[in-house]
Image (cartoon, rainbow, N blue to C red):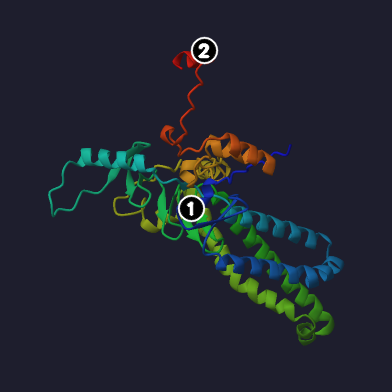
Amino acid sequence: MSVMVVRKKVTRKWEKLPGRNTFCCDGRVMMARQKGIFYLTLFLILGTCTLFFAFECRYLAVQLSPAIPVFAAMLFLFSMATLLRTSFSDPGVIPRALPDEAAFIEMEIEATNGAVPQGQRPPPRIKNFQINNQIVKLKYCYTCKIFRPPRASHCSICDNCVERFDHHCPWVGNCVGKRNYRYFYLFILSLSLLTIYVFAFNIVYVALKSLKIGFLETLKETPGTFLEVLICFFTLWSVVGLTGFHTFLVALNQTTNEDIKGSWTGKNRVQNPYSHGNIVKNCCEVLCGPLPPSVLDRRGILPLEESGSRPPSTQETSSSLLPQSPALTEHLSSNEMPEDSTPEEMPPPEPPEPPQEVAEADK
């Protein structure tokens, strides 16, 4: 007896998440929709390092030291690992409020502010929160229907609120926030070292080859070297400058968003309530502190009501599990009474025959 197994389609939460993010590998990879500049970043790093390992590294390993390609490979792998970790991870997206939660927050706001006369602008939706004896304002997000936590901000590109929002970086194809900032910092730091390393040893390679065959012959023999020098030269200033800027922010326990808005360096001269007043403690908190788990639950399974399907009834399930043989179908149809038939439609029963003695007496 064969049994047909009915498999239900599972709907993951990442398929229904709002915002402008894209997901791959069944929700394990999370990125922004604009990924063109991210592919350019990959092309520049992979192309430059491929040329360096193919031409200059072999010559320098023989002429100077075999440790040169080994150290370059370590920097390259570390840079690629931190880049992919920054690009493919959840930066700290805060889930939007459910309809019931949003309605409750609206009722709470109306009860706090009171009725607003017609024609007047309602007061700003702000809550005051105290951190280290300083008042921090929690702003209401009209898109996510929540009061944002401290240091959180809404990214207009990804259309999500991100915890400890730093900035949206198109070069890594993702927002930079609480859950991936340390990997972003390690990426630009290792990329700066890799760029300086490749640029310096390209100059050494050109100098050694020029002493033997001349500068023009070196240019004709390895034109890829000069392409690497140009790429590294123009990349060096931006990447090293960006690393220095973020090192300054890490030392102060400050974000790029706070620095641009002048949150702690404005006219009020309000001190940063998140800073420990010590560079070492700030660096340890930002780069070595515990990494919070993602609150999105991207690979969680949605209930059937939310995924837009209904559970099958018992009759549908039992009928789908029965063997579909013609003999069994005919037997069931002959024994079943039609649902539309009524007692009036059934033929009346025949009267019983009277006994023989009664019939003779009647005669």
- Point out residue 17 in the picture as x, y percentages from the top left corner: 48, 50
Of 329 and 342, which appears nearest the observer? 342
User: Which label sits in the foreground, 2 or 1?
Assistant: 2
Q: Residue at x 73, y 72 (%)?
A: 202
Please give the residue where the numbered disc 2 appears in the rendered image: 357
Label ID, residue 249: 1
Give the residue type that dot 2 points to: Glu
Of 168 and 274, which appears nearest the observer? 168
Of 209 and 242, which appears nearest the observer? 242
Of 56 and 271, which appears nearest the observer? 56
Place residue 299 in its image quadrant: top right
* Residue furthest to the front: 363
- Point out residue 328 in the picture as x, y percentages from the top left corner: 67, 38
- Point out residue 274 in the picture as x, y percentages from the top left corner: 43, 42
Can residue 325 be spotted in the picture?
no
**Is mark 2 in CB contact (under 8 Å) with mark 1?**
no
- Left or right relative to 3: residue 287: left
Residue at disc 2, secondary structure: helix
Count numbered badges in the picture.
Answer: 2
Label ID, residue 118: none
Label 1 CA crowd tier, 10 Å (few <14, some 14–19, many 20+):
some
Q: Eyeballing the image, is 88 above or below 232?
A: above
Q: Residue at x 77, y 73 (%)?
A: 205
Q: Residue at x 48, y 53 (%)?
A: 249
Label 2 CA crowd tier, 10 Å (few <14, some 14–19, many 20+):
few
Give the residue type that dot 1 points to: Leu
How far apart, in angstroms, are the residues tagged by discs 2 and 1? 118 Å
Rendered-image quadrant of the N terminus = top right
Q: Eyeballing the image, is 224 above or below 57?
A: below
Q: Residue at x 15, y 47 (%)?
A: 116
Place residue 275 in its image quadrant: top left
